[in-house]
Image (cartoon, rainbow, N blue to C red):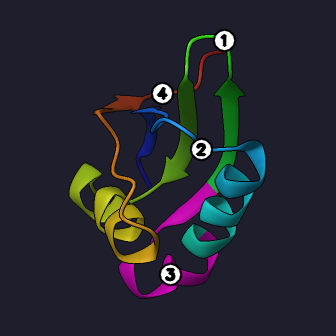
Amino acid sequence: MPLYIDVHTVPAGLKMEDMMQAHKADLQAQGPHDVSYLRYWVDEDEGKIFCLVEAPSAAAASAVHREAHGLVADHIYQVQEGC
């Protein structure tokens, strides 16, 4: 299954706890979309969130975010793991 990294700009006022809850919501919503959110990282200084996801398509990955909490990514990149 393809791997994607998506990049979000953190909305003003969003706290780390809010991001953790959004990730939990992704995990609950991902099954019907055949998506698996694996990890996420936060760069608080730059106001960015990065999510690593296995998904059949970028659209499927985005649908999970939209359904779970509405915080869709600014960009989604298909990536391949290097050695």
> Gap between marks 3 and 1, in whole Å?
29 Å
Q: Amino acid at mark 1?
A: Asp
Residue identifier under label 4: 80
Crowdedness of circle 1 by 10 Å Cα count: few (<14), some, many (20+)? Answer: few
Vertical arrangement, residue 41 with respect to residue 46, above or below: below
Which residue bears the numbered disc 3?
29
Q: Which of the image's four quarters has the C terminus?
A: top right
Q: Earlier in the sequence, mark 2 or mark 3?
A: 2
Of tags 2 and 3, the one toward the viewer is 2
Contact flag, marks 3 and 4 (Cβ < 8 Å)? no
Residue indicated by mark 2:
14
Q: x%, y% of residue 9?
A: 42, 30
Q: Which residue is mark 1?
A: 45
Task: Give the label, 3 or 1, closer to the camera.
Answer: 1
**Apparent side of residue 34 relative to residue 72 in the rendered image (left or right):** right
Quick one: label 4, few (<14), some, or many (20+) residues within 10 Å?
A: few
Question: What percent of the width, then of the height, locates residue 29?
Answer: 50, 81
